[in-house]
Image: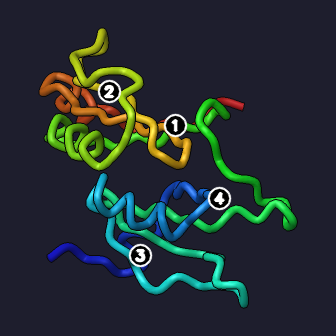
């Protein structure tokens, strides 16, 4: 079983989404992306989700109910955010998400950079890319070392 301690999953950059209907989104992401609830959601006195964490494809996705009265508006496709899932079996992931109710925006197929890739929109208005790296790109990625960003 993978290590699900805080140090193993709560690191790096984590998407935190405000969604209209966080409870429904959590159930949907379970069906579409095999997401698992990590801990119990915190709720306000109205039952709205204030904070929830889902394990998705080896990482964490955090979400809450949109609360415009507190400045938290719902995330939407086309607002500069794209959630990408990288999988060695991207076709199965893509097919599962479509069967669960995602809409195909771009079909899952080989792209100019060598990977198989497709784009989906979920019922909550968010876009998800599924990327299956080619063997060549996997090998190339293994040779890249991080570098400082020039000032």
Distance (Cα) linking label 2 and label 4: 24 Å
Q: Measure the alpha-carbon separation of dots 4 and 1.
A: 14 Å
Mark closer to the chain start, 1 or 3: 3
In front: mark 4 or mark 1? 4
Q: Mark 3 points at which residue?
A: 7
Q: Earlier in the sequence, mark 3 or mark 4?
A: 3
- The residue lying toward the viewer, choosing from 114 and 117, is 117
Q: Which residue is drawn at 53% across and 74% down?
A: 52
Disc on the earlier residue, 1 or 2 = 1
Considering every residue shown, the one lying at the far top of the view is 112
Horizontal side, residue 47 vs residue 29: left or right: right
Badge 3: few (under 14), some or many (20 or more) residues near its Cα, within 10 Å?
few
Read off the residue under disc 4: 18
Q: Are marks 2 and 4 in contact (CB under 8 Å)?
A: no
Tell me the residue at 63%/41% (across/down): 76
The residue pinned by badge 1 equals 82
| Residue located beneath label 2 in the image | 118
């Amino acid at each position: 079983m993978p290590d699900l301690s805080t140090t193993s999953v709560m690191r790096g950059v984590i998407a935190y989404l405000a969604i209209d209907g966080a409870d429904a989104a959590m159930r949907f992401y379970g069906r579409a992306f095999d997401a698992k609830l990590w801990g119990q959601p915190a709720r306000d006195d109205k039952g709205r989700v204030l904070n929830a964490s889902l394990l998705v494809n080896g990482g964490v996705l955090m979400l809450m109910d949109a609360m415009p009265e507190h400045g938290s508006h719902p995330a939407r496709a086309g607002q500069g955010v794209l959630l990408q899932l990288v999988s060695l079996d991207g076709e199965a992931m893509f097919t599962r998400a479509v069967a669960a109710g995602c809409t195909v925006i771009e079909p899952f197929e080989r792209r100019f950079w060598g990977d198989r890739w497709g784009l989906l929109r979920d019922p909550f208005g968010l876009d998800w890319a599924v990327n299956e790296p080619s063997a060549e790109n996997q090998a190339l990625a293994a040779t890249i070392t991080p570098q400082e960003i020039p000032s």
